[in-house]
Image: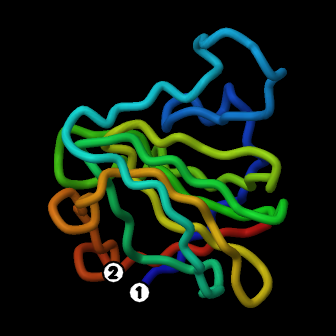
Amino acid sequence: MTLKTLEAQWITAENFQPYGQLITASADGKAFDSTDAQLSFSQGIPRFYIMRLQAKGRRFHRITRHLQCSQCLGSLEGKDWLMAVAPPSEGSEPDLAQLRAFRIPGDCFIKLEPGTWHAGPYFEGDYIDFYNLELSDTNVVDHFTHDFLSRGSLEFEILI
């Protein structure tokens, strides 16, 4: 097995653009524009919920994508977190050359483009509650995973 490291960079709207959008606070009453989450939920019923995730370190060998919808994730209580992403791809594998890790502050959320590969969230501490917006059946009918370990003996670790 080969362990590759990914240095987590602080997320910005510009460096996250190939994968989705970074959404930050805006003034109340601001008109809808391109800085708002551009959502794609036409394939089913949206599901907005809070999920409690237990810490699992910062290593991964599986990465997932959802082709039928956007996905939005953000931490509660202002806690920072990490996510590895690769842009949507035509084939059944992510583009390793474009695999990146991001540090995401707890005062914003991310919107993943449909098809964006993602691993995480990862974080320090025992657990973090995250809000998640996806389709009601995303994890049943739209959950495609690539396993780097079984297909190439690769594992990744996110460094902070």
Residue drawn at x 68%, y 26% is: 14
Q: Which residue is mark 2?
A: 149
Q: Is residue 60 left or right of residue 76?
A: left
Q: Is residue 46 left or right of residue 85?
A: left
Amino acid beneath label 1: Met
Give whichever of discs 2 and 1 has the lower sequence position.
Answer: 1
User: Where residue 105 appears, x then y in whole percent?
Assistant: 80, 53
Residue drawn at x 53%, y 73% is: 156
User: Where residue 26 appears, x then y in whole percent?
Assistant: 80, 25
Q: Secondary structure at mark 2?
A: helix
Task: Give the vertical position of 58 relative to 131 (above or below).
Answer: below
Q: CA distance from mark 2 to mark 1?
A: 7 Å
Amino acid beneath label 2: Leu
Task: Give the vertical position of 133 relative to 151 (above or below).
Answer: above
Mark 2: few/some/many CA within 10 Å (<14, 14-19, 20+): some
**Residue 1: mark:** 1
Mark 1: few/some/many CA within 10 Å (<14, 14-19, 20+): few
Q: Tell whether label 1 touches label 2 (CB within 8 Å).
A: yes
Looking at the rendering, which quadrant does residue 59 occupy?
A: bottom right
Q: Is residue 71 left or right of residue 23?
A: left
Q: Is residue 97 left or right of residue 40?
A: right
Task: Give the vertical position of 26 relative to 71 (above or below).
Answer: above
Nearer the observer, 146 or 71: 71
Q: Secondary structure at mark 1?
A: loop
Looking at the rendering, which quadrant does residue 39 occupy?
A: top left
Query: In what quadrant of the picture does the N terminus appear?
Result: bottom left
Query: In what quadrant of the picture does the C terminus appear?
Result: bottom right
Residue drawn at x 45%, y 57% is: 118
